[in-house]
Amino acid sequence: MISVDDYRATVTALLGTAAPTIRPLAECAGLVLSADVPAGVSLPPFDNSAMDGYAVRSVDVVEATAERAVELPVAEDIPAGRTDVPVLLPGTAHRIMTGAPLPTGADSVVMVEHTDGGTERVRIHAPATPGQHVRRTGEDVAQGTVALAKGSVLGPAQLGLAAAVGLDRLTVHAPPRVLVVSTGSELVTPPDELRPGQIYESNSVMLAAAIRALGCPVEIVRSVADDVPQFRAAIEPRLAETDLVVTSGGVSAGAYEVVKDALTGAGVTFAKVAMQPGGPQGCGRWHGVPVVTLPGNPVSVLVSFEAFLRPALLAALGYAETDRRQARARLTESLRSPAGRRQFRRGFYWQAEGQVTGEVGPRGGPGSHLLAAFTQANCLIVLPEEVTEAAAGAEVSVLLL
Ligand code: AMP
Ligand code: MG
């Protein structure tokens, strides 16, 4: 048996790091920068007003108070978008709007609320200090510096900043195109009705959702019969447009293990991983394309995704952090775990206000077919290889989903 950590490292190495690609901003959400982004312009690009009000020389209004207003002639009107920069003469004011360029000679802005709002002459009721309500060139980002560092995950703020420095495309790690394949002659999909011995296919739906949530495009082969020629025929023609194949089912110790039968000796190695659920696993390259073969039980599929596939895909996407957040929590009831295997149990974690350690209650038994319990879980309880029993009240690690 191979350890969970070693197998995770194997799958991560198999997927590697995705090559850089240039994408329009609108297609970059959730992806990771593969190169630094230099600021081609400063932010703000010019000194501008932070308020609607009047640009002044602060020395001209230093004495202004509510009782003794200072009155100045309004020499210019400067809306946002004015592209010439007027000169403010001593003893005058310019009406100015938020985001409009500060006139040369002005060193501060008096907000309109501290004036009578005049357009010919303005009465100013409050003093100004130098720099007041002025946004300085480059105070957010200086031209030529790194606006976004390589490795940044492109969320709304990062994409906004890229747009603000004038970019419309970015160099990111290309998300792998994933082909998800469900195997099993028992699998059917609506609108077909179940006949005795058949079940509705669900693994591809789960895997596609989990993988798409990481930003990878997914194609699905909803169900392939347990027949090697049919399996090959369903997948081989699609390999040219695929960066990763993820299969479920057909890898354990029985007969009719179609994935094992088709891929053994073709570049894929099958192994038992020291975990529960999800022991039987396989990975390798088929016609040069990385393949990860998961077992068939739905809970095993999702646990395998969490244990290997998610971290490996995140690493491929360029994420530095590939682990789920972990917490320590006290078990609400006792659990048993097989010796020598890391057990992942579905759990519900919560932390009462003021408490340092959270609590976690298992959801469902260890059976890897118990999918309904997973829908009530918000974490995986991790029982290490050496643990065979964890008592109620014992502290355990949980992976927060
Ligand atoms: P296998 O690993 O192919 O022996 O499958 C193990 C169990 O998972 C069997 O009970 C299968 O019917 C079930 N199973 C396999 N694939 C799927 C699927 N795509 N959707 C739902 N259940 C599945
Ligand atoms: Mg099967």
Image (tube, rainbow, N blue to C red):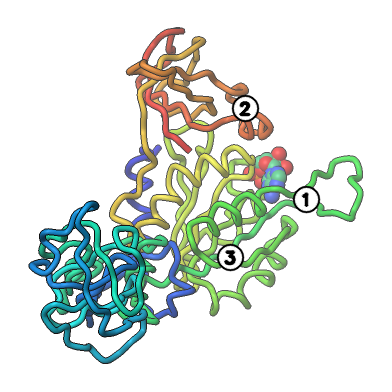
Cα distance in 3D space between marks 3 and 1: 20 Å
Q: Secondary structure at mark 1?
A: strand
Residue for point 26% across, 92% down: 84
Q: Nearer the viewer, mark 3 or mark 1?
A: 3
Q: Residue at x 44, y 50 (%)?
A: 310
Q: Residue at x 67, y 55 (%)?
A: 182
- Left or right: residue 76 versus residue 144 is right
Dot 1 beta carbon under 8 Å from ligand 1 = yes
- In this orientation, does residue 336 appear? yes
| Amino acid type shown at disc 2 | Gly
Residue type, label 1: Leu
First in residue order: circle 1 vs circle 2: 1
Residue that badge 2 annotates:
367
Q: Earlier in the sequence, mark 3 or mark 2?
A: 3
Q: CA distance from mark 3 to mark 2?
A: 28 Å
Where is residue 292 shown, x and y percent of the image? 50, 56
Give the numbered dot on residue 187.
1
Say which residue label 3 marks: 218
Place residue 51 in its image quadrant.
bottom left
Is disc 2 placed on a helix, strand or loop? loop
Q: Are marks 3 and 1 in contact (CB under 8 Å)?
A: no
Q: Give, as a three-letter code, the residue at label 3.
A: Val
Q: Which tag is nearer the camera, tag 3 or tag 2?
A: 3
In which quadrant of the rendered image does the N terminus lie? Answer: top left
